Amino acid sequence: MDPAVGLVFHAHDGTDAASRAALDALLFEIFKLDLGPLDAMDGRDPSYRSFSYFDAGGRCVANASLCALPLVVQGRPVDALGVQSVAVRPELRGRGLFRDLMQRALVWCDVRTPLVLLTTLIPDLYEHFGFRVVPEHRIVGPAPAPEPGMQPARPLVLGADIALVKRLLDSRTPASDLVGLRHFGAMFLQNMAAAPDLRLDHLPGRDAIVASDTRIPGTFRLLDVVAREIPSLATILGALGQIPDRVEICFPTDKLGYVGEAQPAGKRTKLMARGDFVDGSEPFMLPETAAF
Ligand SMILES: CC(C)(COP(=O)(O)OP(=O)(O)OC[C@H]1O[C@@H](n2cnc3c(N)ncnc32)[C@H](O)[C@@H]1OP(=O)(O)O)[C@@H](O)C(=O)NCCC(=O)NCCS
């Protein structure tokens, strides 16, 4: 049976406000995803493209979206695409709508990029489509001595400091040349807005934004660094006034002047790739601020 009987297929982007509002309603219903904070920061991703089915009442009932993922992979720029916002309304599941939309999205990808990524709790869903799980690792170890004499960091407030945050997101260099983002502002803003317990600081001396988690006593978790030039880990610790016993770095440390041990990332969501990606010779992890 045609899975789409009684439904209308529509591919749309951010310029189609009505379709986007209908999709927002689906994402809120299925994932309780609130995009209000992102809108308040005028932070929507302009590259976002959606493949959706709508019912006769104009409700978005099934969706798969793509976003641009401008990466550097082992030193080379790669314009990958990311699959996200995959959802089908419960009453319409099991009739092939997800399969249909994934096929349409991948046809779009195949003529545009050699690499498609996604993150999921259900890898089985995507293996049919040629995706494979890619192991991720964080880097852990004893903390280096903080660099003395650093100008102290200033805690940022995402809303009030949005101009500064956007300026650096727009001009950032990848935090790692092994796997890093060349830019990808929307997800950074959305992920940080959804995690108010994480720290966001500006290092004025280095014009760098540091996203970190200092909730575990004695451990400094470095989530991301957004800057034109990546400061060393010792510089970051010095500016933040942190003297931890242990560090956990959630992206490769090639630019941080730090060598630690690789440890499985232990995330519930798995990263999957379709196409040429890392060769597996060196541990890496996509920063949590880039979770999509
Ligand atoms: C997952 C989801 C998108 C599937 O949508 P659907 O329209 O029911 O899926 P389809 O009918 O197109 O099924 C396509 C294939 O996926 C398989 N599949 C569907 N749901 C699955 C699940 N939860 N686990 C494993 N396989 C699943 C089907 O068995 C089918 O396999 P086949 O091609 O071998 O027959 C839908 O259940 C949903 O919206 N779930 C909640 C949101 C969610 O989990 N999204 C994915 C986030 S990464």
Image (tube, rainbow, N blue to C red):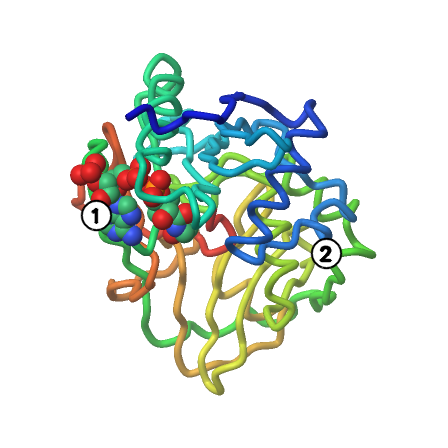
Q: Residue 204 carries which label?
A: 2
Is residue 250 visible in the rendered image? The answer is yes
Sequence order check: which comes first, mark 2 or mark 1?
1
Q: Report if the beta carbon of the residue with label 1 is closer than 8 angstroms to ligand 1.
A: yes
Helix, strand or loop at label 2? It is: loop
Q: Nearer the viewer, residue 89 or 65?
A: 89
Q: Is residue 272 above or below residue 240?
A: above
Q: Is residue 290 above or below residue 79?
A: below
- Given the image, on which type of amino acid does mark 2 rest? Pro
Residue identified by numbered label 1: 124
Q: Residue 73 carries which label?
A: none
Helix, strand or loop at label 1? It is: helix
Q: Where is residue 161 in the image (x, y as percent from the top left)?
A: 79, 54
Q: Where is residue 274 in the image (x, y as percent from the top left)?
A: 25, 32
Q: Position of residue 151 (x, y in %)?
A: 71, 65
Is residue 123 visible in the rendered image? The answer is no
Residue at (65, 33) in percent of width and height: 20
Pick out the residue farthest to the bottom. 217
Q: Quadrant of residue 103?
A: top left
Please tell me how crowded label 1 is: few (under 14), some (14-19), or many (20+) other residues with Cα within 10 Å: few
